[in-house]
Image: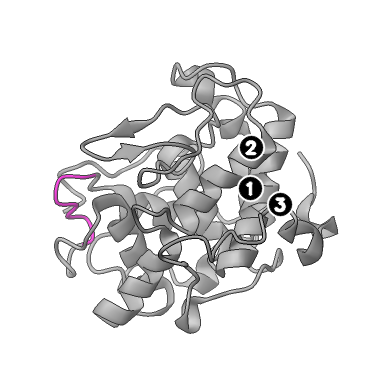
Amino acid sequence: MRASLVSALTLATIATALPANHLTSRTTGEVVTGNVAVTVNDNDGNGPGVDEYILHTGNGAFGFPSTSQWVNFIDMFNANEVLMFESCENNGWGANDSQQEVDDILTAIEAVAAATLVDHRFILAIILQESAGCVRVPTTGNGVSNPGLMQDHDGSNSCAGVDPCPQATITGMISDGTAGTASGDGLANCLNEAQNDFGVTGAQAFYYAARIYNSGSIPDPNDLGNSGGATNCYVSDVANRLTGWVTAASTCTSSNAE
C-alpha cells in the first residue's frame, strides 16, 4: 500500500480534475458553509484508528465519536484499499477495481473535497457505505435513479458494465454525490441542511447529513437509527468507518439501530 499518494498533490493539480464550471453549472451550487467546512489536509486525523464496530444510537451527539476521534484520511484510505480491490467481484458487479481506478478514486475525492469544502474522510465513508468503492457498482433506485460510487440522486455518471472506468467518470460520480446533481442534494447541501434546519454542528452535523443522504430527511432527530424505511444502520456504520472500522463484525441490525 502507498504511504501517501495525495501528499505530493497540490490544490492546483487537484483542481484540474474538475471542469471550471463544475459547481456554478449546478442548480444547487453546493458548497459547505459554517464551521463544518474544511480544506484538504492529509494530516487531519487521529492516526489509523481501530478496526472495531461500536453500535451508536441516539441523536448523533452523546456516545458518537467526535471529529477529534476520526482517523487520518490517508490511513483510512489505505486500510480500505483491500475492500476496493475485491468489492466488485465479491458483489457480482463485474471486474474488480484496477490500481489505476483506485488511484483515480483517491484523486477525485481530494479534488471534490477541495471544491466543496466537504471533509474528505466523510466522502470516503459514504463511498464505502454505498458501493465499497466498486467503480462498476450498478444503478439502483426506488422511484429515483441512484447511480455510481455514491449512489447519488439521479446523476449522469456511472461505470456499470464499463471496464476500465475513465478518470473523468470517477470524478463525476464523486462530484454528483458530494456537490449534488440538478435533481437532488449531495453531501454538501446535506451538511448545510443539518446546520441550518436542525441547528447542529461539529460531528453531529455529519451524522445528521448521513441520515439525510440515505433517507432524504430526518425521520426522528432524536434517533438517527430510524431511517424511515431506508437503512437503519447507516449512520452508525458511517461513524464507525470514520474511526477505523474496516472488516470487523458489525453489531448493528435493523432492529437494534432504532
Which amino acid type is shown beneath numbered disc 2?
Answer: Glu
Q: Report if the CB atoms under discs 1 and 3 are less than 8 Å apart.
A: no
Which amino acid type is shown beneath numbered disc 3?
Answer: Ala
* Rendered residue at 22%/60% (across/down): 217
Which amino acid type is shown beneath numbered disc 1?
Answer: Phe
N-term-proximal mark, 2 vs 3: 3
Counting from the top left corner in percent of width and height, residue 75 is at 67, 52
Q: Quadrant of the N terminus?
A: top right
Which sits in the foreground, 167 or 87? Answer: 167
Question: What predominant SS class does the magenta segment belong to?
Answer: loop
Say if residue 129 shows up in the picture: yes
Q: Residues within 10 Å of mark 3 (few under 14, many from 20)?
A: some
Q: Quadrant of the C terminus?
A: bottom left
Q: Which quadrant holds residue 98?
A: top right
**The stretch drawn in magenta includes residue 226:** yes
Counting from the top left corner in percent of width and height, residue 71 is at 58, 60
Counting from the top left corner in percent of width and height, residue 194 is at 32, 73
Question: Above or below — where is 218 with respect to 19?
Answer: below
| Local secondary structure at mark 2 | helix
Residue range in magenta is 224-230
Kindly identify which numbered label has been placed on residue 77. 1
| Local secondary structure at mark 3 | loop
Say if residue 206 shows up in the picture: no
Which sits in the foreground, 247 or 201? Answer: 201
Q: Which residue is mark 2?
A: 81
Q: Report if the CB atoms under discs 2 and 1 are less than 8 Å apart.
A: yes
